[in-house]
């Protein structure tokens, strides 16, 4: 039996759904024959499992007819398109932004804004073009944390120019309202505000837009996921069980919204004693590794309680920029590198599959020597 015989036999196999056969289509790439054993390598354009299964079956039938007993068909199909968070709507209202990173948490006050600010700055320091959107409509803290609280927005046409600090473009509801002013938000107003933040801000061609979310799983999260294809999600948690419970809700939300999970940031994980520079256990340490495992994602960083982090937030001088040698800054840099790698992988593979989990070893616990 020759390769020509095999090609001839395969002319009886139509490409599923078409009247043309797979040889005429040019899908049969190579054939290897070894006695009554044959291997057929086929490239097809559909990634649908039914198409592959039907072709394998029909190829087997035709090659058995001409005497082969051992038939292997390798089908090379394109990867299915990434299941995007907006797959139901197909919308992307900010197409000039390459990637959207949602920073979320189940619980309030765990350090989402701190993480968003420092991750955005770390990514910018690593050469990315980064934007930071404060989507916490109720409690916008980004302007203070980025040191732009006194700046007034500039309008161009009917769009707003983002602020810039530490190499990061920024927009926040806090910059559009008077200081101390509160707004009572209805769900529909939140939806409109998030949409406007994506559509009516003059963001540059950004590599990544880091989005600081309000706590929980509500209208803001859903609107974001329905307005743009969210590339990756990060959940911020503190180590206590009550916080971990809430972080599970946040990770579950990513899954429900088809947002690939980049990982978990465990904040307030141990305390760096300013006196001796040692790390001490306060709320627990490393506990979120188990939650990351449960959701098949990784622990991106353990950020200790460091007084400088709070001061950096309050004074608009984030540690990642102003104290680059601090433990926190270095861990945010590491988390940023891992996140960039995850985003690259999502884009390359066209599919979401999270990195293997790196176990962390919490350092020993002993008394703080100075206070
Ligand atoms: N690792 C840390 N060390 C010291 N202080 C921290 C640390 N992380 C956060 N903080 C401080 O804790 C407070 C709450 O943090 P942050 O505002 O980032 O939380 P959040 O999750 O964004 O809160 P909200 O749910 O209200 O938006 C801030 O004053 C911040 O500076
Ligand atoms: Mg916040």
Image (cartoon, grey):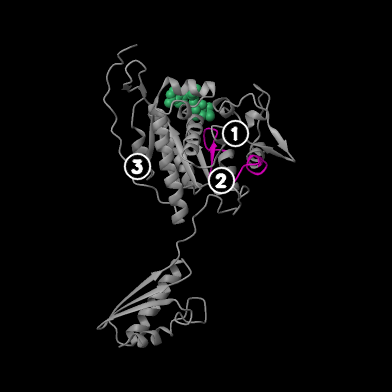
Residue sitting farthest toward the left: 35
Q: Is residue 268 visible?
A: no
Left of 78 or right of it: where is 224? right
Kindly identify which residue carries mark 2: 225
Secondary element at tag 1: strand
First along the sequence among labels 2 and 3: 2
Mark 2: few, some, or many residues within 10 Å (few <14, many ≥20)?
Answer: many
Q: What stretch is highlighted in magenta?
A: 196-218
Mark 3: few, some, or many residues within 10 Å (few <14, many ≥20)?
Answer: some
Left of 121 or right of it: where is 298? left
Kindly identify which residue carries mark 1: 164
How far apart in space, not on screen, are marks 1 and 2 (Cα)?
25 Å
Query: Foreground mark, 1 or 3?
Result: 1
Residue 204 part of the magenta-drawn span: yes
Question: Is the CB–ligand 2 distance for label 2 below 8 Å?
Answer: no
How far apart in space, not on screen, are marks 1 and 3 (Cα)?
37 Å
How far apart in space, not on screen, are marks 2 and 3 (Cα)?
24 Å
Residue 356 part of the magenta-drawn span: no
In the image, residue 76 sits, relative to residue 324, either above or below, namely: below
Kindly identify which residue carries mark 3: 293
Q: Which of 139 and 155 is in front in this view?
A: 155
Query: Residue at the location (57% across, 43% down)?
Result: 222
Q: Position of residue 82 (x, y in %)?
A: 49, 55
């Amino acid at each position: 039996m020759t390769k020509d015989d095999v090609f001839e036999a395969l002319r009886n196999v139509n490409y599923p759904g078409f009247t043309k056969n797979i040889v005429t289509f040019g899908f049969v790439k190579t054939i290897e024959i070894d006695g009554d054993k044959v291997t057929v390598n086929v490239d097809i354009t559909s990634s649908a499992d039914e198409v592959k299964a039907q072709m394998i079956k029909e190829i087997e039938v035709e090659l058995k007819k001409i005497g082969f007993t051992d038939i292997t068909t390798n089908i090379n199909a394109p990867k299915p398109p990434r299941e995007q968070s907006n797959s139901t709507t197909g919308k992307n209202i900010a197409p000039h932004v390459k990637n959207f990173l949602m920073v979320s948490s189940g619980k309030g006050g765990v350090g989402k804004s701190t993480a968003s600010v420092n991750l955005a700055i770390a990514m910018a320091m690593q050469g990315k073009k980064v934007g930071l959107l404060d989507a916490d409509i109720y409690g916008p803290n980004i302007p203070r944390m980025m040191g732009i609280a006194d700046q007034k927005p500039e309008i161009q046409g009917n769009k707003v120019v983002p602020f810039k600090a530490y190499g990061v473009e920024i927009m926040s509801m806090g910059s559009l309202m008077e200081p101390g002013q509160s707004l009572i938000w209805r769900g529909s107003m939140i939806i409109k505000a998030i949409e406007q933040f994506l559509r009516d801000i003059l963001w540059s061609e950004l590599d990544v837009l880091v989005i600081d979310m309000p706590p929980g799983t509500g209208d803001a999260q859903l609107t974001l996921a329905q307005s743009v294809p969210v590339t990756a999600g990060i959940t911020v948690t503190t180590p206590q069980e009550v916080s971990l419970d809430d972080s599970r809700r946040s990770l579950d939300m990513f899954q429900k919204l088809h947002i690939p999970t980049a990982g978990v940031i465990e904040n307030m994980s141990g305390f760096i004693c300013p006196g001796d520079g040692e790390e001490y256990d306060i709320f627990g340490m490393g506990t979120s590794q188990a939650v990351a495992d449960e959701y098949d994602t990784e622990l991106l960083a353990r950020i200790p309680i460091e007084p400088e982090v709070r001061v950096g937030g309050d004074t608009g001088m984030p540690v990642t920029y102003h104290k680059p040698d601090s433990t926190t800054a270095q861990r945010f840099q590491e988390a940023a590198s891992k996140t960039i790698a995850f985003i690259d992988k999502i884009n390359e593979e066209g599919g979401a599959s999270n990195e293997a989990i790196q176990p962390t070893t919490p350092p020993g616990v002993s008394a703080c020597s100075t206070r």
